Image (cartoon, grey):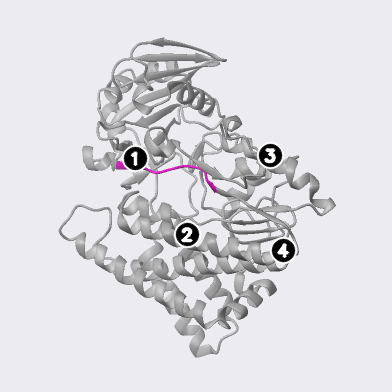
Amino acid sequence: QAGIMFGNRFDIPGFRWYEKERGLAVLSRRPDQVQAVRARVSRGRPGILRGGSCYVSIFDGDADLALFTLSALHPQHFLENARGIGLLLLFLLNPFRVLRLLGLISMGSLAGLGRRLVALVQPSILNPFDVLSPLLHAVSDAFFTEAQTFGVMLDIYRCVPAVYANYNSYDEVAHKLGPDHPAAFRVLRSVDKRIRQINRMRARYQRREYDLYVISDHGNTPSVPFSWRNGTNLGQYIAAQVGAELSVDELTGTHVHSTEKTRYLLKELQSLEHHLSPRLRQVFAAARHYVNRRVLTGQELDYDLERQKDVIVSASGPLAHVYFNVSPHPLDLTEVMLLYPRLLDSLLSNSDIGAIAARAGERTIVLGHQGGMSIIEGGRETVAQPHPLLPFGDTVYGAAQVHRLAHFPHAGDLIILGAVEPDGKVVTFERQVSTHGGLGGPQDHPFVAWPPERPLAPETLNDAQDLYPYFTRHYVDQSLAGEPHDVA
């Protein structure tokens, strides 16, 4: 999103990372930290949503209205915002939409309970004894899907210059059940229906001409958790290989989208409590505290994240950054080898680890499980066969991406890629059965669908941020002249 909206994703090494010089864990679910990243990546760069609206997103793209968006500098409660209240009233006046919302909640809750019953007899990342989460996730998913769709349609009617809506329910279901699970495909069909609704609205109300873009910035690859194969997470595994009295901390998390949607809904309810009678206020507060205690606590450590451990492992799907706190500056590969002589061999001997990358001055060295090595410097690559990135697909693309990542200021001292299995699955360092964020398989295949009359040349796109100059040139720079803008 940072690349698409601001044309800059520099030094965003994953969904979560660690800043050694400050002893600070950075998570893409903390509003204060996302706002700091937004301020950095947007410096001198106008967002593509300037003057428009943004729904259910991490970054806001300079939108005037940013609902359920983490990086909004002035967070707006949906139910305390004039446009939010108006949208809600219009929504409630449509019986069909209300009935559909209730139906989606009912079906989602029953399906979630059914999957937890199945988890009693089949291996699953789901907790079979958690009967509250299915209801909460069904409520939040249905609410956000319907609210943002209705919001986009209303914005088209109001001639808002740019609108961005983010449908992430498929991603969440795929993480839990797999990318080709029937439930995941049902979510995709539901998203398709919402896009068709938006497109019909676009075609019907032509007071302002809109272009419609549908973008997916990544795919999903079937995966198997590292902890299932090894009986321990990656951080504990590294501690065991080093064989020293090390303190290891691992930053990870699961089901981020659904958890954050639930948090948003709880905040909305909290914002309404002071309008209620004392008795109702007590009921709402008790329910909110119960959900916080039973469902959200422990999903991912909250705001006390300054850590002073010896080793920090920060996992984002099949990609893990390993930081050694012996020094506040990034370590080169030779320094890591001097500090922990047996660590690299121990890691590469594990078939669930596909490759390890590290800095060596201006160069990047990539070591593969099968014994190959790649040295990348500038635009040149020297390879000792077999190529360490060959199992991951396109070696030229992979080498360029790994080299760029390794030289981010806050990339790990070691970067570990989960292995690609013979059946196409990728080993992930989170509890997921479908993953993205690394290399290998469909996760490397984003897509963009655009109006055929627009001069978008997909062969020129090698990165999400390559879309930014296109949107800026064709829409943002022309917005003052009243030219059409985009709906993504």
Kindly give the residue lying farthest to the right in the view shown: 481
Q: Is residue 1 above or below residue 52?
A: above
Instruction: Give how far apart the Cα atoms at labels 2 and 3 are.
Output: 25 Å
* Mark in the foreground, 2 or 1: 2
Kindly give the residue lying farthest to the left in the view shown: 121
Residue 429 occupies quadrant: top left
Identified at 56% across, 29% down, the residue is 408
Residue 119 lies within the magenta run? no
What residue span does the magenta drawing correspond to?
A: 215-223
Horizontal and vertical percent position of residue 30 = 54, 53
Q: Secondary structure at mark 2?
A: helix
Which mark is first along the chain, 1 or 2?
A: 2
Amino acid type, residue under disc 4 in the picture: Gln
Amino acid type, residue under disc 2 in the picture: Val
Amino acid type, residue under disc 3 in the picture: Tyr
Q: Secondary structure at mark 1?
A: loop
**Residue that carries the numbered disc 3 in the rendered image:** 470
Foreground of the two, 310 or 261: 261
Q: Secondary structure at mark 3?
A: helix
* Mark in the foreground, 3 or 1: 3
Residue 191: image tag: 2
Left or right: 198, with 370 as reference point: right
Which mark is first along the chain, 2 or 4?
A: 2
Residue 222 lies within the magenta run? yes
Residue 404 occupies quadrant: top right
Instruction: Give how far apart the Cα atoms at labels 4 and 2 are.
Output: 23 Å
Alpha-carbon neighbours of circle 1 within 10 Å: few (<14), some, or many (≥20)? many
**Residue that carries the numbered disc 4 in the rendered image:** 206
Which mark is first along the chain, 1 or 3?
A: 1
Q: Is residue 179 above or below residue 314?
A: below
